[in-house]
Image (tube, grey):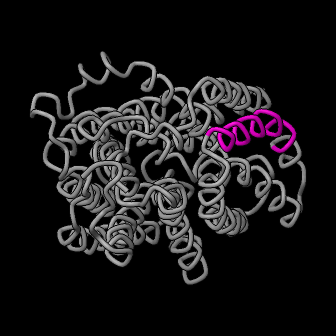
Amino acid sequence: MTAATPDPTGGRARLRAILSGSVGNLVEWYDWYTYSATALYFAPVFFPKGDQTAQLLQTAAIFAVGFFARPVGAWVMGRYSDRAGRKAALTLSVAMMCGGSLVIAVTPGAARIGIAAPIILLLARIFQGLSLGGEYGASATYMSETAGRAHRGFWSSFNYVTLIGGQLVALAVLIVLQRLLSLPQMADWGWRIPFVIGAGLAVVAFWLRRSMQESQSFLNADAPAAERGSPRLLLRRYPRETLTILGLTAGGSMIFYVYTTYMQKFLTNTAGFSKAGATELSAATLIAFMAAQPLCGWLSDRIGRKIMLLIAFGGSALITWPVMTRLAAIGSIEGAFLLIFAAVLFESAYTSISAVVKAELFPTNLRSLGVALPYALANALFGGTAEYVALWFKSAGTESGFYIYASALSAISFVAALTMQDTQIHSRILED
């Protein structure tokens, strides 16, 4: 198949393939975000000493360590995806995520097994980090390769629809439990239920992914085995593309985690909202954020990827300070929703096309690795540490310093977007 040859699969087959990839992606991210969504309840179980900020700081540290496992997972699973296929990598990653969730669900607290409790929690998160490190690259690649050229931005936006959807489902499960269980029950054993649900859903996703069709791009690739998923070849032939992804992801992942996983803690710990109120407000903004993804993806198919990235990072660099400062003192749920929604609308111009922009930069034989590795490195350095850095600034009494830090990273991403080519025009995905 060449660039001029249409994909023999019809629209229905294409939709089925994208849905198969999306369902597993949602489950993976549900399992990942369940940790953050329930941290307010299990932090005292694993870290009983100190006040709430100190306990959350320790859970945020483990959250960050899980992110640092993702580059290793991206390297291993990215190579595996480029060599064995997207389907094989996606099936393996969801099985690994299932195991990590199950371990967290059954691990006793520090009161029963002492220091072993946080150690097991750490190891489980590392295992999940290895899984997720490969998931993003393989799923972003698979969905971008499966989508047609004319609507590639729209269809690949569902990568983040399901990513946000996973986080939203995690919050929805938590909201239901908060309504059904008392606060002591949630703190004692209720927080374990979302992890059990995640392990069960991962089994279903594993079964669905086993019946997925392989992407036509991978089937058509004719590169020799030595050039499939080679880190050395990636860095030697595509250093600029690799650095571009690092630059885009630095600000993109930071702002994403500021307004998603960290926002729930910020609303409780700084703005003074109740735990239940913060959780419900976070869920509402995530619904709006998720709904914006296909719209922004569709828009990128019409005006180009580059201008969308410039809107995203330019806007984030300008509004992060005033939005976070106002949120800290607003006191109104409606006002807080509008502020957060304005911020995530700018972020949507990046997240909706994050998958396709990265996939379009690389040839088939290096695509999964090229997408996954620099993304995972930047995510570990900036996204995974967002909560920890924010809480560190707060504990030091200079919380506004974090707003400056997040704005600066957005400015760096703006420069990266400004200096790159528009991948819609210069795409290396040849199949349509």
Inspect the magenta stretch and tell me whether residue 144 lies in it.
Answer: no
Q: Percent from the top left, x then y, of residue 25?
A: 38, 61
- In the image, 409 versus 368, the foreground residue is 368
x, y (%) of residue 350? 61, 45
Position of residue 387 measured from the top left corner of the image (x, y, whole percent): 59, 39
**Is there any visible trace of residue 382 in the rendered image?**
yes
Count of numbered circles on the image: 0
- Comparing 368 with 215, the one in front is 215
Image side of residue 231 versus residue 393, left or right: left
In-image side of 129 versus 149 (left or right): left
Picture quadrant where residue 409 is located: top right
Q: Residue 129, how many percent across, how many down?
A: 34, 44
Q: Residue at x 36, y 78 (%)?
A: 12
Residue 111 visible at all: no
Reply above or below: 234 against 309: above
State the extent of the magenta-drawn residues as a range.
306-323
| In front of the other: 225 or 379 | 225
Q: Residue placed at 35% from the left, 52% from the top?
A: 4
Q: Residue furthest left?
A: 225
Q: Residue furthest front?
A: 4
Relative to 222, does residue 245 appear above or below in the rendering?
above
